[in-house]
Each structure stands twice: as structure tokens, then as C-alpha cells.
Image: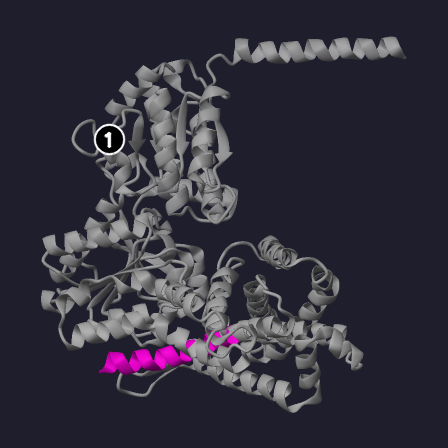
Amino acid sequence: MRSSLKRKRLLLGIILLTALALPGAAMAEEIKIGVLFPLTGGAAAAGRELRSGAELALEIANSAMPDIDMTMAKNAGIKSMGGSKITLIFKDHEGNPTLGADLAKKLILDDKVHGLMGAYHSAVTKTVSAVAEQYGIPLINDSSTSPELTKQGYKWFWRTTPHDIYFTKDLFEFLKGLTEGKVKGVPAVPKQDILNLASACEKTEWGAAVSELIEKFGKDYGFEVKKSILYAAKATDLSSEVRSLIAVKPDAMLFASYTSDAILMMKTLKDQKAAPKLLWGQNAGFEVPEFVSTLGDAAVGSLTRTVFIPKIAQVKPVAAKVNSMYKAKTGNDLSGASARSFTGLQAWVHVLEKAGSLKPADIQKAANAIEIPGAELVVPWQGIKFATSGDDIGQNTLGMGLIGQYQKTADGKIDLEIVYPFNVATANMLYPFPKF
Amino acid sequence: MDILLGSIASGILLGMVLSLVALGLTIIFGLMDIVNFAHGEFLMIGMYTGLLTAQATGLDPLLTLPLAAGIGFLLGVACYGGFVKYLLRGPMIAQLLGTFGLMLLLRNIALLFFGSEDRGLHHGLLVGKSFDIGMGIIISATKLAVAVLAVLSFCGVWLLMNRTKLGKALTATALNRQGARYMGIPTERMNALAWGIGCATVTVAGALIVNFWSVNPYVGLIFTMIAFTVVALGGFGSVPGAFFAGLVVGFIMEIPGFWDFFAITFDIGWMADVPMTSFKYTWIYVAYFVIMLIRPRGLFGWKQ
């Protein structure tokens, strides 16, 4: 009995030793990327989408799928490194900046990752990027939009997603287009008709920054921002805010809101019989599924900026292909979150392919040099190319946003239709905003 | 002028909603000297009760009110019998921490079962309806309903406390528990009843409030804070005090509206530039602070 136990132990030891030794030998070229997302907590729903998007990109990168028109689908693994496969190590930062920084350190020191990706919340990305900078490990950010992040002059930080300056500029390009008759299905609107704007933004870093951008671009584009309100996203009642907005009789109402406040805002606008000609939200609360499921028909006609709308598949075959794979895998369409994490990992694959080695310095050099054409991306950007100089270092200069409008389809469903950029519009815009 | 009248109307309605939310807190405090930190969580439970029942049965949300009241009453009695009764034997700090713990427990149970996302009603007799009666006064049907319920509840509780034997027994228990027991009043049952009534008023408020505000497991905290201010302003334990204090707090929350009125009517540039809405809740806490400083008893307080 005893000897058999000993033998078992010996056997186990040998197995363990081989298991330990094997990765050293056979998997020397395994590429490890640490991915930080909010997988639990308030943003868990977004976290799950982000994770699924990155996993789908990983699947495509690690196996050859010639029917997808993407460079990373052509080979299994990274060709320039002899077909090395990528492994993603997911960590949950719960939306907590301190935890995010700790996890990034663990990934670098314990898991010895070659690179990082994440982290959705701008506040978390900020602390994680500081850790990456300290250790000289490349970090590609896929989905944080605070303009501040690429203003830090970091040498190990790259961001694929456009940030809020781009998105707010898009809004004003769109308004300008509206006055020039460029919007599908809407004859040119006299500027006088949409001259007066009013904005209400939640008052933490994100909303406050958006509020300032709206004022700045409003001035640049010759609109009049009559009222800029900052409010608490946790507010229980927004009737005084809404009355304040209505009091200046704005033609367009602009919002930067999280989930519950976006819904409350819309309900209060409806209660107070607000009648703007145009209503726009800076994604977040205006893009989550609850926005439509809670508001129903009241959502119809409102605009939101985003980076991905399933309708993009109509004008982009590669997006249609990836979207159908994603749907088969998760049951959902790609969203602004999953499409961006997919694209973030895609950028990683291109960087690694170009670097041809796992030395941080080589990866850094490659990241600064890559250029991914827009045709390969699921998002409607002109491509990915990072700025290497100027005041926005590491920012993808070819990104752009979409503006979608909630419209009712023939079968009674409420869907996002693209209204901007004008050349990919999928439907006639509803203008003016239908009365609540 | 429109904005002034609109703000006044909205302040009154909102004030009544808030006084209804605070009613249960003042009942429980007035009768038992317990500060119930879990008060907002009872509101949250009422909101979920209204929401889920309406969604599951397809009934109009208004019909869920009796159920919410029943659940609130039972929950209150159960909380007293199974938990608070034992806390009362401990020192004051145990009661504070005890109800604080209850708050965390209820919130996390809600989180476990309902998830963290916001949910709201979008069908119902009153949902999304409002009346424009001119001159800038727009009355939302749901808030009007809550206001009516508030008046009814306050009248009901006031009558109960002042015109019935039961009310006398409750008051006697509150004033001197031992003395009441000597007079043959079943004080334990009175306490349980106080908790039952207190919780029932707040859950029924929740079931009605969910018609216009959405619910998530964290929604209780801000209501607890506001309810505390209302109760402190009105005087801890005072039922009429809570009603009038609710109105005052409603007006305080409309300060940005009054500010706008002055800024626009008199065309004062610097006033229009002050981000008053950012400080909306600040005034409530300033009011709370000032009251605590100059009149800790509150406006109608009868307890020292």
C-alpha cells in the first residue's frame, strides 16, 4: 500500500517536472498579453462584451481563416515569429483604478506578459498606463476615450479608439452637414433653425470634459451654446435641470450621461414636454441596451455617437463576416465595446507581426510604425496609425466615430441607423426630433 | 414667470414625494428611537416589488400598491421580531451599526437577485403622462399620484396616532416603555407594529415611485440621505413635521430653477454662468448642517 503510494508520488513528480519543463521547451515563443477589463461590478456587462470581442480576435489570429479578408486571418499565429500563438491573460479590475494598477504590476512581474491591453474606464487606463510606462511594457488601449490619456507623453502607450475630441467634433461636423443638406433624407436646414444649443453633462471627469468640448467646438463652428449644465449622475430627480434646459429654448439638446441618468433625463424631458429639434447623446448611457428597452418609443429619434452599429455590416463586408461569427459565439451583435476590443487585439497582432520579436524595444518600434488599412477593420475608421509626435502621442490618427439614430423598423423593433458619416448612412434621418 | 411657476409646482410635487419617503423613517424613529439606515433599502424593495409584479403579471403598476404595502408590513414586522428586538438590548452604537448592516445585507441580496443594471417601467396608466396646465406648470401624472398618496398616508398616520386607542398605545410605548407595559400595553407588539407601518409606507411609496424613477440595488442610499434631512428638519419623530419639511426640501431642490428665473428675468449674465445644478444636493446638506447647528430638535420636534 505504502510503496504504491510512493510510486504514485514519484510518478506525479515526474509528470509535474515534465509539465514544468515542457512549456520552457515547446512554448518558448508563446506570446502573453495581459488584458484588463471590468468583468464584475457596475460595468460588468460592458466587460463581458469587451472580453468576447478580444477572444474572437484571438481565435482569428491564432488560426488560419482565409475566408476573412484580414491580414491576421491569413496565418495561424504570428508568422514573423514562426507561427507563435498568442495567449490572453484576463484580469478583472472591477472599475477600480488602484486594483487596475496592482493587477498590471502582477501581470508584468508574475505572469511576465509581453504586452498589455485595456482597460475601458479612462480612470483605470490612466493608472495602468503609468505602471506600463514605469516597467517599459507596451500597452494598447482599445476603449477609453478621455483625451487626457494620450496627452501624457508616454512612450509605451498607444490608443486605437478615437477620443472625445474626435467624437465631439463629429457632432459639429454633423450639425454643419445638416445645414448644408448633406444628411440623408433631410433638405438643408437653415442654420438659424439649429443655432441654439444646450448641453447637460454628468459632472465627473468625462462629462465635464465633454461639456467643455461642446462649448469650444460650438464657438468654433459658429453655434450658440445657450446653457451648459453639469449634474450629478446619481441624481434622483432631474426636473430642475430639464426646466433649466427648456428655459433657454434650445434647438438642439446635447448630453453626456451614464445609464440611469440618461434614462431619467429622457423620461423627465418627456414629462416636461421638451420639444428640441435634435437630441444627441455622447454614447455611454445612450448606447446601452437598457436605453431602448426601458424607454421604448420615447427613444426613437434620439442620436448617439458610437463606433459600431450592426448596420455597418451593410456597407462593410468584413464587418458583416466578423459580426456573424460574433453572433454565433455570443448570441449578440457586435457593439461599440466588443468591436473596439476586437480592433485593439487586431492592432496587437499587427504590431507583433511587424516587430518579429518579443523585445519591448522592438515592439515599441513596430507600434510606432504600423499602418493598418481601414478595409481590414470592423469599425468604420480610415485605418490605424499612431501619432509619434505632437501633443497626442500614441493616438490613432485615422479613427472616427459614427452617429446613429434610433428608428423604428417595419416590424416594430427599435434599431440604430447610421446618419453620420454621410457616405455610410443607412437610413433617412428623422428630422426634426419627433415630439415625445 | 413661467419658469418660476414651473419650479414652484415642481417643488411642491417633489416635496410631497420626499415627505412620503421620509414618513416611515420618522415613524420608526419617533416611536422607537432607532435610526434606521436601511430605510432607503426598504424603498428599493418597494420599487422592485412594484416593478417585478407589474412586469410578471401584466397588471397596471398602480394595482401592485397593496401588495407592496403588505410585503413592506411583513418585512418590517419580521425585521423587528428577528433582528431589531435584539438590537434594542444593546447600546446605541449596536443599533446604529445593526441597521447599517441590514442596509448592506438588503442591498447585496438585491444585487444578487436583480443584478446591478437599472430597470424601469414603461407601461402603465400613469407612466410618462403629464398635464400642461399653462403658464409653464407641467404636472407629471405619476408625481401627482405620489403627492395624493402622501397626503392620504400622512392623514391616515396622523389619525391613527391621535384619534385611536392603538395610536395612544403606540405613543405610550414610545414615551415610556416600562410604564406602558405596567398599564397592560403589549409593547413588543406595538414596536413590531411601528416597524410594520413604517416599512409599509415606504414600500408603497417605492412601488409608486418606480413609475417615474428607475431602480437599481444602490438607489436606496440617496433616498436615505434625503429622508434623514427631511426628518431632521421636521423634527425626529414628528409626523406633521416630516410633511412640511418634505415640502421645504422639495423647494431646496428647486433652487436652480429659482436661480434661473432671476438670471433670465433680470438678464443677469453672471448668474446664468453659475453652474447651480452641479450643487443641487449641496443645499440639502447645508440645510441639514444648519438645522443640526441651530435647532437640533427640528422644526416640529417633540423629543429632546
Left or right: A39 as drawn, with respect to B198: left
Q: Is residue A392 magenta?
A: no
Closest to the observer, B170 or B8 = B170
**Residue sitting at x 45%, y 42%:** A95
Task: Write down the region rendered in magenta.
Answer: B1-21
Q: Position of residue B235 (x, y in %)?
A: 50, 74
Q: Given the image, on which type of amino acid does mark 1 rest?
A: Lys
User: For residue A33, what is the image quadrant?
Assistant: top left
**Residue sitting at x 20%, y 54%:** A214
Closest to the observer, B35 or A163 = B35
- Magenta span dominant secondary structure: helix
Q: Position of residue A315 (x, y in %)?
A: 29, 47
Q: Position of residue A269 (x, y in %)?
A: 33, 71
Q: Residue furthest bottom?
A: B163
Of all chains, the one bearing label 1 is A
Q: Position of residue A53 (x, y in %)?
A: 44, 39
